Image (cartoon, helix red, strand yellow):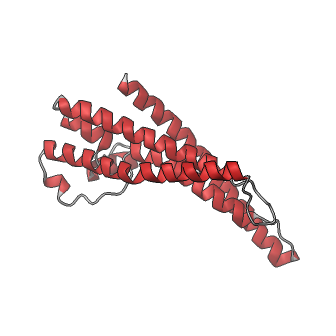
Amino acid sequence: MMDKLLAWDGKLSLWLVWIGGAGLLGSAIMVTVDVALRDLLGVTLGGADEISGYIFAISTAFALPYALLNRTNVRIDALYVLMPGRVRAILDMVSTLALAVFAFPLTWWVYGMVSDSIALGTRSITPLRTPVAIPQTLWLGGLTLFCLTLVLVLVVSAIRLSRGDHAGVHAVAGVLTINETIDDETPTGGQVG
């Protein structure tokens, strides 16, 4: 059951990364066109900086669950690799819990901000007059999925640790080893030639 949830979460997070990436690409094109128009014709699209800021925040939040599930979050592992499997598994869970200690209050704060924006009908103070609850809600959605993913990773890790499956904990919550990174980045699975 938990592995199915993990797989479903992985598929959803992959879609969100693609959506966020497309948004960033569109934002880069929009800013480039805006700069070119200003330089060449003295006109502007207006709002390119505002929209790109929203897209950056949303795409970052959308990428967080993917980064967690694919273990691409940065951790210093100089001593970690020298530890026995059980200690590494516990450190993996502690690091995931530390991430949750940051993510949950942030998400709660964003929820309060979105609630206030909706209640007050807050709009940006730019010429676009964007109802800020729209981008904030998308940002909150990404952060909420990140928090749910953190819970899922912690539960799966705890189950695997209780079974003595240290490699299983590493597979879901551990930092990528150099060999795993090489395997991921080479088309031949780490084999040269």
Question: So how many labels did they put on this image?
Answer: 0
Report x, y in % for residue 35: 76, 72
Above or below, comparing residue 57 to residue 111 in the picture: below
Q: Is residue 14 left or right of residue 181?
A: right
Residue located 41% across and 25% down the image = 4
Rendering quarter of residue 34: bottom right
Please state the horizontal and vertical placement of residue 1, each as a whole percent of the image: 37, 21
| Rendering coords of residue 46 (x, y %) | 80, 66
Kindly tell me whether residue 193 is visible in this rendering: no
Q: Is residue 163 above or below residue 147?
A: above
Residue 39 can be seen, yes or no? yes
Is 54 positioned to the left or the right of 144 in the image?
Answer: right
* Residue in front for this viewpoint, 101 or 3: 101
Residue 188 falls left or right of residue 179:
right
Residue at screen point 40% across, 46% down? 68
Q: Is residue 1 above or below residue 118?
A: above
Residue at image point 16% right, 32% down: 164
Residue that lies at the very extreme toward the top in this rendered image: 1
- Residue beneath the point at 20% across and 44% down: 90
- In-front residue for pair 153/102: 102
